[in-house]
Amino acid sequence: MRKGSMRFLALASLALLAMSTSASSATILVFGQSNTSTDIVTATNAGGLTTFSSGPGIPAAPITVGVTNIGGVTPPPGTTLPETFSFTSTAPVTGSAGNFSQGGFNGTFSFGTQVVGSVTGGILDTTSGPNGATGSFQATNVTFTTLGPAILAQLGIPGIVPGLGGTLSFSLVLTSVPTSLNFTAQNSGLVTANVIPEPASLVMASLSVVAGLGCFGVRRFKASRA
């Protein structure tokens, strides 16, 4: 095989590989607690490790959240889902009382039957200041086991993709000022999915790249023979 042809095939292969592994982040859920007077989330520390869960304690219990975006679409006003989650840390706490950070949180979450998945390596932070105590929970390593049909349709996915990942982000307003590493809070948040382009679009785009590289190779070959 000519050296020029081998170079062309190598370039084409690299282009296809890059395109096949590309993904974009898509919003699949935006929510906030709809009953802020009674529903809470809880952080409970024991032996240096923390369990962060929905409901007033351990085990986790469902609480109601209002949904303002699902699968990139605004649902009818008043749309709610039951939120349930429980994450337990594997890393020690840094800081103390109202200002602490803890990582390594692993566990599962669900928003009804629409969004179900697991988290590894989540991070929980709290900050106390003159305007009260706030916090956050961030997880960039999320694996979904279930996404509802409406969400899949909006994302252009025919069915659940094994291993589909994403992110989970909670904002917290603490309802009890943490004098220890335990607290209660209200939560709102965002869930995203890493969406891979559908096969048909991927093939068409790949063919365009290969055709372009082919034309480039032909011109180079003709120029070398001139």
Image (cartoon, rainbow, N blue to C red):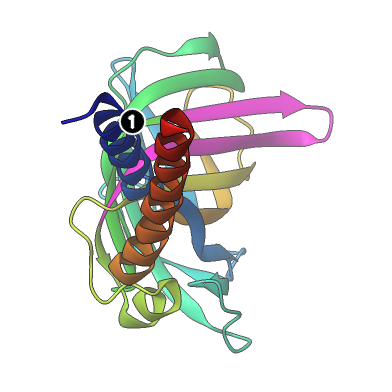
Residue 8, horizontal then vertical, whole percent: 32, 36
Hey, what amino acid is under mark 1?
Phe
Dot 1 corresponds to which residue? 105
**Mark 1 secondary-structure assignment:** strand
Examine the residues drawn in magenta and state their main secondary structure. Answer: strand
Closest to the observer, 207 or 166: 207
Magenta residue span: 123-144
Residue 2, horizontal then vertical, whole percent: 22, 29
x 27%, y 21%: residue: 90
Q: Is residue 195 visible?
A: no
Instruction: Report how many numbered discs are placed on residues in the image.
Output: 1
Closest to the observer, 112 or 131: 112
Question: Does residue 176 appear left or right of residue 197 in this picture?
Answer: right
Closest to the observer, 103 or 218: 218
Q: Is residue 41 magenta?
A: no
- Which quadrant of the view contains residue 193? bottom left
x 39%, y 36%: residue: 221
Say few, some or many: other residues with alpha carbon within 10 Å of mark 1 (under 14 / 14 to 19 / 20 or more).
many
Farthest residue toward the right? 130
Residue 105, horizontal then vertical, whole percent: 33, 30
Q: Is residue 109 visible?
A: yes
x 42%, y 37%: residue: 140
Q: Is residue 131 magenta?
A: yes
Residue 22, horizontal then vertical, whole percent: 40, 46
- 18 relative to 114, above or below: above
- 122 relative to 149, above or below: above
Farthest residue toward the front? 226
x 28%, y 61%: residue: 116
- Which quadrant of the view contains residue 174? top right
Quadrant where the image shows the N terminus: top left
Question: Does residue 14 appear left or right of residue 168 in this picture?
Answer: left
Question: Does residue 137 appear left or right of residue 198 in this picture?
Answer: right
